Image: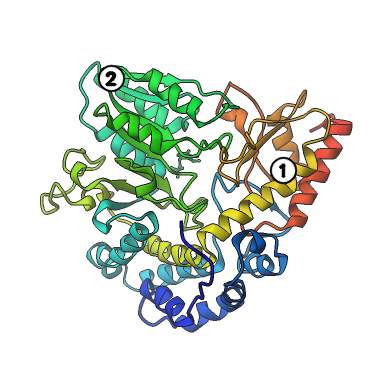
Amino acid sequence: MINTMKRQVPRRRFLRTLGGTMTAGVTASLATSMQRPVIAAVNRAAGSAPQQVAADESFWREVQQSFSVDRAITYLNTSGASPSPRVVTDAITRQLLELEKAPSRNLFVPLAARMEPVRTELAKLFGCAGDEVAITRNATDALNTVLLGLPLSPGDEVLTTTQDYWAMLDALEQRRRRDGIVVKKITLPIFPRGMDDLVQAFERGITPRTKLILVTHPLNLTGQLLPVKQICEIAHARGIEVLVDGAQSIGHFGVKQAELDCDYFGASLHKWLMAPKETGMLYVKRDKIAKLWPLFPAPDSVKNDDIRRFEAFGTRSPVLLAIGEAVAYNNDLGAQRKEARLRFLTRHWVEQVKTLPKVRFHTSFEPGMNAGGIATMEITGVSSAALTAYLWSRHQIVVFDVARRTTEFQGIRITPHVHTTLEELDRFCDVIETVVSKGLPPTA
Ligand SMILES: Cc1ncc(COP(=O)(O)O)c(C=O)c1O
């Protein structure tokens, strides 16, 4: 994890980072002046522990104001997609305006060259080599590259869980029908007694035919962290590879390849990292690149062991260059500070509603068991679909109805982010309290 203690953000570095993905003719000063209050706040907080900064509302007020979110809306669905700070949305606008001057001169080869610093920054973020990171369009792209591209024979098994993301389970189902592989899904307890419970659940699912384990880190429906490192250990000891679905981890907390030791890792960047929408990354351990079939065949000029062979999507948009600004913004906030704040925000709303009658949680709050920014609650007797619709239509509060994606339980998933104010969370809690005492209005 990144050490945020005593770390100053030099203004020059910020300028350089911003300039690194900027097109000619755009001055860095515009973007930088908008970030100045955040830089000042980060520098003021340099000597303080992340837990202390997490509760410092004057620090987070500056951060909140660096977004152009609509405060008439309470947005609590980071796990779906996060608002980006203005430094990112401005970069998107700049890139698009520059593009339109001469599209073909800004796309294709020039764009490919300008993606390289972004690749380097993503690799640093994940703690791997630049030639192990492909820039994809989202997590689905990244993860499907492995699920559909790994050579497997009929009867080979892929082990995963019933709580993995639907698009990955769909990809495996197609592979089952097309290639005759076996997809084995284990059901995880919502409240495991400890990480060992989860490791053992995976261990019991392994057979001599298991070739790949798909594990999500953390689960998007509950925020449950999975013991990825231990799962990798038991898998590798049996010659099994591990693909990690990190859609909910990158930018949520500091996550490094060495801490997981996975073979493959796919993530969206438009969630906790706050990067432009339709951006993602795929990590492939260097010695596994050549054996993986790309989703879209790359030209012969791209060597088999070149990670760029997984980026042959056709024409791409320079909007992805603004990933660089998102990484810089996240780095400057600091992974530990961000994680501490997300835990603080979750505690803030959970403490207010947890003692209300009929409120129950589908998230474990035992130490070390959840990711911090994700928690799922239910009001017994109230449909989560109806509650989600009501929160939006009457209160402009955006949450996610987990019953859309699982039949194992129902509830609303609440995922605030650094732009979220305590007042917004209080507003949400007030509405929940009213629904608990009065129920949903008949027309909701
Ligand atoms: C765990 C998990 N995996 C994969 C995805 C897919 O992400 P994307 O839509 O960026 O492809 C999501 C999206 O919510 C997710 O939560």
- Mark 1 or mark 2: which is in front? 2
Residue at the extreme left: 300
Question: Is 403 situated above or below 146?
Answer: above
Contact check, label 1 and label 2, Cβ < 8 Å = no
Report if the beta carbon of the residue with label 1 is closer than 8 angstroms to ligand 1: no
> Is the C terminus in the top left, top right, bottom left or bottom right quadrant?
top right
Query: In terms of depth relative to the viewer, which is nearer, 224 or 22?
Result: 224
Query: Residue sitting at 54 percent across and 60 percent down?
Result: 84
Amino acid type, callout 2: Ile
Which circle marks residue 365 in the picture?
none
Q: Position of residue 431 (x, y in %)?
A: 81, 42
Question: Is 187 situated above or below 411?
Answer: above
Question: Is 185 situated above or below 39?
Answer: above
Question: In the displayed structure, does residue 188 sit left or right of residue 60?
Answer: left
Report if the beta carbon of the residue with label 2 is closer than 8 angstroms to ligand 1: no
Query: In terms of depth relative to the viewer, which is nearer, 62 or 204?
Result: 204
Q: Position of residue 369 (x, y in %)?
A: 56, 37
Q: Quadrant of residue 405?
A: top right
Query: Residue sitting at 51 percent across and 38 percent down?
Result: 225
Query: How far, Cα to Cα, is label 1 from label 2?
Result: 42 Å
Query: Residue sitting at 70 percent across and 47 percent down?
Result: 347
Q: Which residue is mark 2?
A: 181
Question: In the displayed structure, does residue 269 sit left or right of residue 283?
Answer: right
Question: In the displayed structure, does residue 138 sit left or right of residue 299?
Answer: right
Q: Which residue is mark 1?
A: 392
Residue at the extreme right: 438
- Which badge, 1 or 2, comes first in the chain's sequence? 2
